Image (spheres, rainbow, N blue to C red):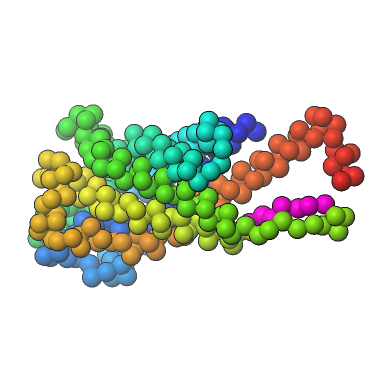
Amino acid sequence: MDPVLADFVAGTLGGCAGVIVGYPLDTVKVRLQTQSAAAPLYKGTYHCLSTIVKNESFWGMYKGMSSPLCGVAVINAIVFGVYGNSMRYLQQNTLTNNLIAGSFAGAVQSLISCPMELAKTKMQLQGVLGPDPMNAIKSGILQKPALYRSPVDCLWKLYSEHGLRTFYRGFWVTIAREVPGFGSYFFSYEYLTRIMTPHGTFDARGNYVEGQLGIGRLMMAGGLSGIISWLVSFPQDVVKSRYQADEQYTSARQCMVMSYRTEGAGVFARGLWSTILRAFPTNAATLTVVTLFLRYVGDLNDDKYLQEHDLTGFLHRA
């Protein structure tokens, strides 16, 4: 398989695995981030999760998932495709190049993730909170009915009311989140896989065999990389969520300033624990699936090369 195509397919598969594993806690994160400190609806991560299940059923945790699940095919294909091509362009697999390639990938995928997350945020906050979620949160009043039937319906109604420009509400704060977030993501994953990889050994015939990470260590490296990425980018994510959810803000900067003045610095860490809880399994699943798929493709390509050059006999003799 062509390396470029392999990067896109790997990103798609890994992203879908990550969304399915981590979406319930993403819903919790958004609701905790956007609720008011003056009239909070939820006491914490567990209370939020149990309240959603009690009032909205188990599937309430997956409200709006069709948007990221459909969009993740595009987003992760872009992220891993751009990252892979950038690394091939930079040629050397250094930690610095991983940081650069990851940051560039994050910037590019923001073009898709911004409107997709706008729809996701609107869907996650509606229904139980109604079409005006921030006012409902501040007043403690639960409003119904829900305004949007699906993420596509949400985007269509936003477009009808405000035009195409509304899709990119929060675009620059999304960039501010994704560039350092993905830069640190790929940097930390490369570093962790390096230090976790066991040293090579010699087999019974005296041939050197390079060390290879097992699934357990891959999942550990992926999960920790996800946590590091979120620690770097979480304050930006809070501002993005609040700005996209509340039409009263005229800019992300105003949102940040007003949130700080009314609720203090702690507002920028609201929902952090639920995010960390979600980040580990989500990114463990994502990066493990990506790595195993690329490893599988690499093995297939090696076998194909040997067959094309009639080297299979040499391989068996080695």
Q: Residue 279's quadrant in the figure? A: bottom left
Residue 102 place in picture, x, y as percent: 44, 41
Q: Nearer the viewer, residue 135 or 14?
A: 14
Q: Nearer the viewer, residue 223 or 13?
A: 223
Residue in the picture at 38% in, 61% down: 276
Residue 210 part of the magenta-drawn span: yes
Residue in the picture at 85% in, 55% down: 206
Assign the magenta stretch its main secondary structure.
Answer: loop
- Determine if residue 115 is in view: yes
Left or right of residue 46, residue 262 in this image:
left
Is 95 situated above or below 309? below
Left or right of residue 237, residue 79 in this image:
right
Q: Nearer the viewer, residue 45 or 177?
A: 177
Q: Quadrant of the N terminus?
A: top right
Residue in the picture at 50% in, 55% down: 222
Give, as a single range, the part of the protein colored magenta: 207-213
Residue 209 place in picture, x, y as percent: 76, 53
Residue 99 place in picture, x, y as percent: 45, 43
